[in-house]
Amino acid sequence: MTPTLPLVRGGALAAAFAAVLAALSACGSLRTPGTPDELALHVGRLHADLRLQVADFEGQHDFTGSTLALPKPAQPKVPDSQVSARISSKDATGDALTLKWSNAWFASLRFVADKPMDLRPWLPDGTLEFDVEALDMAKAGLTFVMGCGADCGRKLPWQVPSRALQGLGWQHLSFSLQCFARDGNDFSAVTQPFVVDTSGTGEVSVANVRIVKNGKPNASCPDHRTESVTPAPLTQVWSLEWWIPRHEKKLDEIRQLRAQGLQPEVIFIGDSITQGWEDAGKAVWERHYKRYNALDLGFGGDHTENVLWRLQHGEVHGIRPKVAVLMIGTNNTGDRQEDPATTAAGVKRIVEELRQRLPDTKILLLAVFPRDELPTGRMRRLNDRVNAQIAGLHDGQHVHFLNLNAALMNPDGTLSKDILPDLLHLSEKGYVLWAQSMEPTLRKLLSE
């Protein structure tokens, strides 16, 4: 049907034009393009604008056939790891994807868009939905990731819940797209709309991956605005076997000190960099801190919320140290690319917790150490912004802020691998520099 345009004069033009629009709309000749109800990323087959990629700690490769086993470099950093992927089936032949890994520091299945996708129309009330089968998750766990523009990838940690899915067959998951959204993110240029990250040993299949415009979430996610200040144990895959036992070991160390009538004069609180006093920094610790009955409360991988959990579960109970050395935040930056204000809020919350539990202890709050080789590195810049904010916690009486970063850097701000071998953790030389540069301030606080 083709509408007939009436002959009109003067003031009748507007009414006639409205009638034409109504006629065109009624016959389907005029429609405003809208956002589809669903964006199928992999429903039966991969979206035409996407490609599959499989990655491990050694590198990444496109997945174009029916199977892929990631090759090993000539000198692998993780020689025992194996990562592979294959086309598998759920409702029809070849409609699913399976990732299998063993002894892996890192394994990933990625949907990659060479031409960035604009997901803004789906963002307000949209969901990321997919079917998942946890074939082997006893020593693994899943993290779901979505890219959100340049230098941006938002992680949704789901390690513990994913373990609970083993043996239950195919399950449908639906997450709000808001789980992946932060203020300032650019969802107009998403290059990785769906990623499954993991480590350890396991096997998982996914199918029917799609973005739904007005979906109904059936799974929750942490609130990124409060995650850094909400006490929680660390639940990374690689930490599940040792984190709680280390916590219990530290409680036992405190009990033993108290049984001997001893008090630690100094405690160190932090993440893997602080835990490193027991490894690369052990000899330096013996020379500088053993005489203080010092206690190392550093836990690899910890974020601010993990330190809070430990403090609330006994790690400073019954002790009265003169000084607590605190450095935390680089995993909030590196793991979550968190807003520095959110990380700083977590540090502030830890300081408040220490002030409440150890009212007579002076807190030596250290700036988060530098990372990334160049001063322009994204993680370095985020840490610098954290440091600028937590410096304001210094009051000169109970809390003393100290920035030692210049001692760990070259004059031009770059990092050297003889001090930070992986551009994050310290060598023995790095621990020497830490101890030496902190010594004057520590002695002053101890004397007070």
Image (cartoon, grey):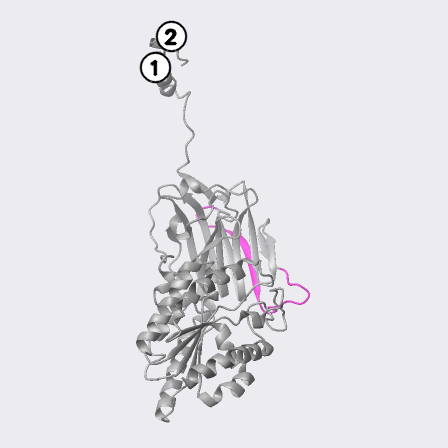
Does the magenta portion include 74?
Answer: yes
Magenta region, residue range: 71-92
Contact? badges 2 and 1 (CB < 8 Å) = yes
130 displayed left or right of 66 = left
The residues tagged by marks 2 and 1 sit, at their Cα atoms, a distance apart of 9 Å
Q: Position of residue 77 (x, y in %)?
A: 62, 68
Above or below, 78 against 176 in this view is below
Name the residue tied to disc 1. 19
For image coordinates 37% across by 18% down, the residue present is 21
The residue singled out by tag 2 in the image is: 6
Assign a secondary structure to mark 1: helix
Residue 163 visible to an observer of this rendering = no
Q: Please tell me how crowded label 1 is: few (under 14), some (14-19), or many (20+) other residues with Cα within 10 Å.
A: some
Q: Give the camera-side residue of 202 and 88.
A: 202
Q: Nearer the viewer, residue 238 or 121?
A: 121
- Mark 1: amino acid: Ala
- x and y percent of residue 349 in the render? 35, 67
Question: Residue pushed farthest left?
Answer: 356
Q: Which of 238 and 324 is in front in this view?
A: 324
Specify whether residue 288 is painted magenta.
no
Q: What residue type is labelled 2?
A: Pro
Magenta stretch: helix, strand or loop mostly: loop
Q: Which label sits on residue 316?
A: none
Q: 94 above or below 107? A: above
Q: Quadrant of the C terminus?
A: bottom left
